[in-house]
Amino acid sequence: MDDYQTCPKCKTTKYRNPAMVLMVNACGHALCESCVELLFAKGSGACPECKCPLRRNNFRVQLFEDPAVDKEVDIRKRILKEFNKRQEDFPTLREYNDYLEEVETIIFNLVFDIDPAGTNKMIDNYKKENKDITQKNRNRQSQEEMELEELLEAEKAQQSEKANLYVNAELEEKKQKHKAREKLIDELMFSDADAKSIVASHVQATAALAKEQPKAAAQPSSGVVKSSKFSSGVQIGLRGQHTNSFLPIPKQEDLPLHRYTAPVFDYDGPPPPAIEKLGKLNYFANIRAANITERAGGYTEAMSCCRALQEALGGLFYSPQLTHKTAVLATNSSTQDTDDMETT
């Protein structure tokens, strides 16, 4: 669908100019980047479609296929910066729901240009009456964003620490195995003891060492992430505490292995000769032989010849047994008709 995006001013399409970038402004009408630079060279101008006064700095790249969606997203962001009250700012849940409904009505009116003058006047009155609450909620939101960033950084540090623990544990395990292997070889080469007893003691020592080694996954990390939650109530920072909440992988039943069975072709006529016998029966006399390139890909003239014979004979209908039965039935029918005529 991107190939059919068209600039309403210069009629350039994404198909003819793949480098074309569509941009939108507050009115929601799209223009290509070249038209924006041409029409708004002085910094401001009017929209070619709705004649709404616009500024060049307010143009942004169109993210969605429908520019109306970009318009709604921009309006929603702008309105929610001012209408940022929370549920704890209202005495009852009903009043909070009425407030949310009022916000959605304002956004709807601005998106579809329903009484824009009255809507903007309502927004200005709200800003004046709720200036302190709006600023307080903005500061609270910025503080929560900082706490969220700290939590994310702590989670990253914890993951990095766990990864380092796993890497160090693997390296240490490899070193221990290498030392044990060298020790076993030295004992087998220079010791006078029985080889079986040496190997048995080596197996016991390896098993004991494996039990003594601490598992990095079982050790808790030093950086514990404290739980918190978003303003909506969604918990965050608890991902590491619920690693065992996944369902177990279901066990697959042992199914029998697949066995190839040759396809069966039903022919009502004479069956075609086998592909291995086509050369002996001189079927290749009037067929072009496969060249080197075709043979490299696995193609031979026997394939096309066999397929042509199968298609030709597949359309025939002939069976000696059926023909014999038909002839017998026809003879019996004619004899019966003759007897009936004589009796009459």
Image (cartoon, grey):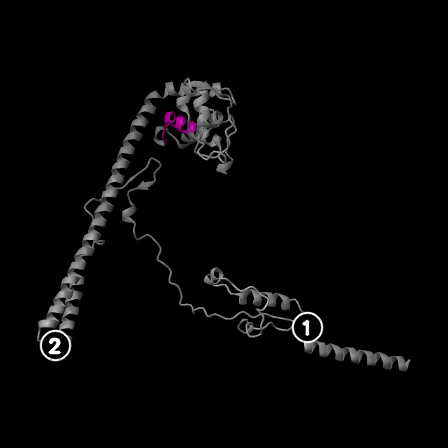
- Residue 298 in magenta stretch: no
**In front: 206, or 24?**
24
**Label 1 SS:** loop
Q: Amino acid at mark 1?
A: Tyr
Which circle marks residue 194 in the picture? 2
**Label 2 SS:** loop
What residue is rendered at 86% in x and 80% in y?
Answer: 338
Residue 182 is situated, as x and y percent measured from the top left of the image, at 13, 65
Which circle marks residue 148 in the picture? none
Along the horizontal axis of the image, is 266 left or right of 19? right
Label 2: few (<14), some (14–19) or many (≥20) C-alpha neighbours in 10 Å: few
What residue is rendered at 50% in x and 62% in y?
Answer: 291
Q: Amino acid at mark 2?
A: Asp
Q: Which residues are magenta?
A: 74-86
Residue 221 is situated, as x and y percent measured from the top left of the image, at 20, 48
Q: Give the main secondary structure of the magenta stretch.
A: helix
State the image quarter where residue 170 is shown. bottom left
Residue 128 to residue 332: above or below:
above
Question: Which residue is denoted by mark 1 in the rendering?
Answer: 318
**In front: 24, or 87?**
24
